[in-house]
Image (spheres, rainbow, N blue to C red):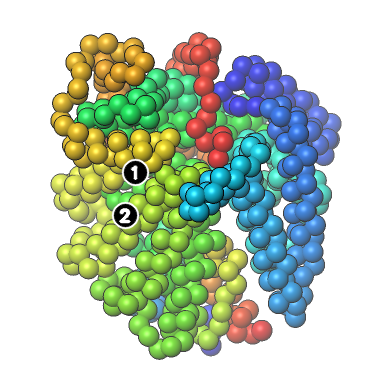
Amino acid sequence: MTDQDIFDALSQILRILLRNESVVLTARTTRRDVPGWDSLNYINFIAAVEGKFGIKFRMADVESFETVGSIVEAIKARKGA
Amino acid sequence: MLFNSDEFILLFLPVTVAGFLLFGRGSRSLAWAWLIAASIFFYAWWRPFNLVIIGSSIAVNFAFACVLLRLAREDSRRRLRTLVLTSGILFNVAFLGYFKYANFLVIAANDLTGSNFVLAHIILPLGISFITFQKIALLVDVAGGRVESFTTRDFLLFVLFFPPLISGPIVHYRELIPQVHAAKCRFNADMFAAALTLFCFGLFKKVVLADGIAQYVSPIFAAAAAGEVMTLPHAWFAAVGFTEQIYFDFSGYSDMACGAALFFGLRLPINFDSPLRASSIINFWVHWHMTLTRFLTAYIYNPIALALLRRRSAKGMSTLSSRGSSAGAFVSVLVWPVLATMLVSGAWHGAGYTFLLWGLLHGVYLIVNHAWRQYGPASTPPKGMRPPFVTFIGFILTFVAVTFGMILFRAPDLASAVNLVKGFVGFHGILPVRDVANAAPIQGELVAISLRALAYLVGLLVIALLMPNSLQMMSKYEPALYIEKHAPQVAGVGPSFYWRPSIPWMGFIAVLAAVSMIRLSGRSEFLYWQF
């Protein structure tokens, strides 16, 4: 799985969650950049990502992800571990 | 020591800043050591014994942090790490619980069982609620590998740094200490001017605006507590007036904390961003006491919601989407975490039934808000594209809901809260019992609402709702972290009032400072300092 595949998968999850087809996530995207991506949808997103990749994030990570790029890094680290 | 005191403004702050800059010319380590020493003095001023209490908490947390630092590097010992982290959090919660809630729990137990236990009165160490939360966040960061190393000095600086010590903003280690490492500890004219300005803005908000309205609000709550029947105008004046009071009080305090930190080149996170303009309850909490909302979301709401979501998806049940979720999903993964979070918030604010009710009320507000988003009219256009009247209705509903809640927050006991709530909804009649003529409180009689009081109430409302806020005006100099850059206009139109170090601004700030210092003679305390 390439980084781009992961970004695509994340974008797709958020599109379904927010019912907004125009969502495109990049490494630098933050929650503020996406309208409607509030704390509730954030935690739903995290749960959906965990399901999709079969991983569990650490609570400290969930709290401190600044960008989508850092989420992708954490996914790769978890998948690799 | 409180920020709005002569000894802080005229002695402690100037001496500490001067010493810091002086030492900074020679050695940065010396400057930080000076700041730690000054912070200890600041904390001990009110009651030196507090140092022993807080010192023991610091020592235990230091030990926990050291152990967690070792375990965080070894992925094979996750279980042990979780165990140590849990013990650390429990220690902090128990520490806070003993000082803050032991008395209340004994009262509640007496109420329930009809017994009559008496506990020696426990004096609350200054700022313990804030200090406790900050330490819990540190332990979580260390365990999660977000803080990879720390020295004793950095640890002490983080737990003792005086500006956010007693009432926040609740700052993370990972936000503060990297700034310490990068700071030059030298005099910088722009930064100094910004720090002084922000401190003066905060002081003015506190001693002129908040204390100004407090003199009209407090007698009403006192009369309500004395059993005086509250009619509609008084209840509304009390609710709206207290909402203004606590907003200017606490946001003023936060400005002073951010300003004081900036003297040392350090930026604290923004804590208030004109919350009373919010057009929904969710939005209110995004802009009110922002560092607390952030803390509660990260450490209470998220873990509960995530655990519930994981469990539901493991069972193959539906989870939440942004609209039209199943009722089961809504109740189990939204209602429970929100209620739990807001109850904790209520309890954190104070030991008493009224605070628990206030937390519960806001939990219900938030659930209604989320339910509206899930099941309300489908075609809600995104923010900024809504018709103005929709936003306006949202604003009115939010404002009334928030001010209504403030009755519970401020009322000294349940009986006076009920009295005021009945007045607020018109149960006690629409007109004041006695005529409006005299502003002076009369023992046992309802205080009249004078024209002067009304003018104060409306004036503060105009400032809170229409004027650009202090951090907005200063945003070009980034006096705090995470300031959203919206133009500092009046009511969203016309010219932008950006602060810059100039003669006209200096004159303006000097007037604010002078008025504040004159008013300071009739001193009061921060509402939040005891939390």
Quadrant occupied by the C terminus of chain B: top right
What residue lies at 61% left-to-right and 42% top-to-bottom?
B118
Q: At which x and y percent is residue B530?
A: 56, 36
Q: Amino acid at mark 2?
A: Tyr
- Residue B347 in view: no
Front residue of B373 and B451 = B451
Residue B124 picture quarter: top right
Q: Chain of mark 2?
A: B
Where is residue B405 drawn, in percent x and y? 34, 43
Which residue lies under the disc numbered 2? B365
Give B80 or A50, whichever is nearer the viewer.
B80
Which type of secondary structure does the marked residue at label 1 adopt? Answer: helix
The residue sitting at 29% across, 51% down in the picture is: B280
What residue appears at the point 56 percent right and 79 percent down from the top-left corner?
A: A56
Q: Nearer the N terminus, badge 2 or badge 1? A: 2
Camera-side residue of B6 and B94: B94
Q: What residue sits right under mark 1 in the picture?
A: B405
Discs 2 and 1 lie in a common subunit: yes
Q: Position of residue B325 (x, y in %)?
A: 29, 75
